[in-house]
Image (cartoon, helix red, strand yellow):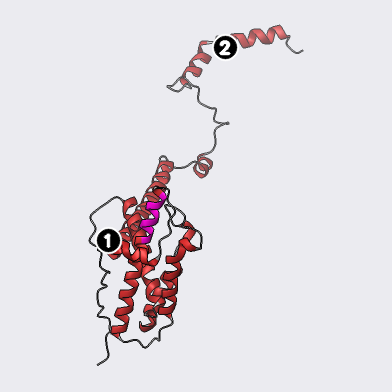
Amino acid sequence: MDPSPDTLAASMHAQLIDPNVLAQLSASAIPNGQNALPMAMASPPEQRAEHDEPPGSGFKTGSLAKEKHSATEKRRRDRIAEGMTQLKDAVLPGKEKEDQAGFLRSAANYIRQLQEALSHLQAMGAVAKLPEDAQWSIRALLMRRLPQAALPRAAAPPPAGADAALPQLLGYLLQQMSKEPGSQDEQQLQASMAQAALMHQMQTQYQSYFQQCVQTQQTPSPTPGQLQALLQQQRQPPMDLPRTSSPALSPQP
């Protein structure tokens, strides 16, 4: 005959308040107050070893990744600093120390001036006298010129017509110089370079005059004779380009 529910409840209550049962429960408790898992619910040591990572392994992995990233970033900064040093030595060797932004602007202006000078030399046929590797370098540098629309300008030039007589004259002179035979001797080449320097000075003077007219709201319309008078007022002699000692430009014995 099965015991009644009241009998079972009384038996379980008696076991719970039994001192021996309470002593066993106290012995199985861990120091932080949480009871340990029964042995049937705990995972075997072999299974825990397969899935659990060693203590501190996660910290070591993150530290190695951070060190690798720092080393890569340092190498990148070193390469940039080395490139900036080489650019300064090649472009502006005697310039005082300045911030990177100012140095890059100065280098860009210097490269534009160099490209302009190479354009004049190429128009005069002087590039054809240089060695083949030098010609290739000059053409490659000229191909990297920025488009005229990208260059900063204070004001737009006047439209073609009577106001643009001087730029047309400069273009005509350059065209005539480019038609000269390529067998010029050193004297003729130096004369052409001096003429190009004078033309460059005239063009600079015209640009300055044009900016003054824009500021005073006047219409610029100088003729070549008027511009020559402006040059005489400034009393600026034509620029003398240094005579080169390159074997390609030296007279043959």
Q: Quadrant of residue 237?
A: bottom left
The quarter of the picture where the C terminus appears is bottom left
* Side (left or right) of 73 relative to 148: left
Q: Residue 156's spot in the image, x, y percent?
A: 47, 55
Point out which mark residue 233 bears: 1
- In the rendered view, tell whether residue 162 sits above or below residue 252: above
- The answer to whether residue 137 shows anywhere in this view is no
Rendered residue at 46%/63% (across/down): 164
Circle 1 residues within 10 Å: few <14, some 14–19, many ≥20: few
* Residue 58: percent from left, percent from top: 44, 42
Q: Are marks 1 and 2 in contact (CB under 8 Å)?
A: no
The chief SS type of the magenta part is helix
- Specify the amino acid type for callout 2: Leu
Q: Amino acid at mark 1?
A: Gln
The residue indicated by pointer 2 is 16
> Per the image, is 141 magenta?
no
Q: Kindly identify the residue that appears in the image at 35 percent across and 57 percent down.
A: 80
Q: Which mark is residue 51?
A: none
Q: Would you say residue 42 is visible in this rendering? A: yes
- Residue drawn at x 51%, y 59% as measured from the top left: 159
Mark closer to the chain start, 1 or 2: 2
What is the C-alpha distance between the residues marked 1 and 2?
120 Å
Q: Which residues are magenta?
A: 206-214
Q: Position of residue 184 (x, y in %)?
A: 34, 86
Q: Is residue 124 above or below residue 161?
A: below
Any magenta on residue 210?
Answer: yes
Residue situated in front as seen by the camera: 18 or 174: 174
Quadrant (top left, top right, bottom left, bottom right) of the N terminus: top right
Q: Is residue 148 left or right of residue 206?
A: right
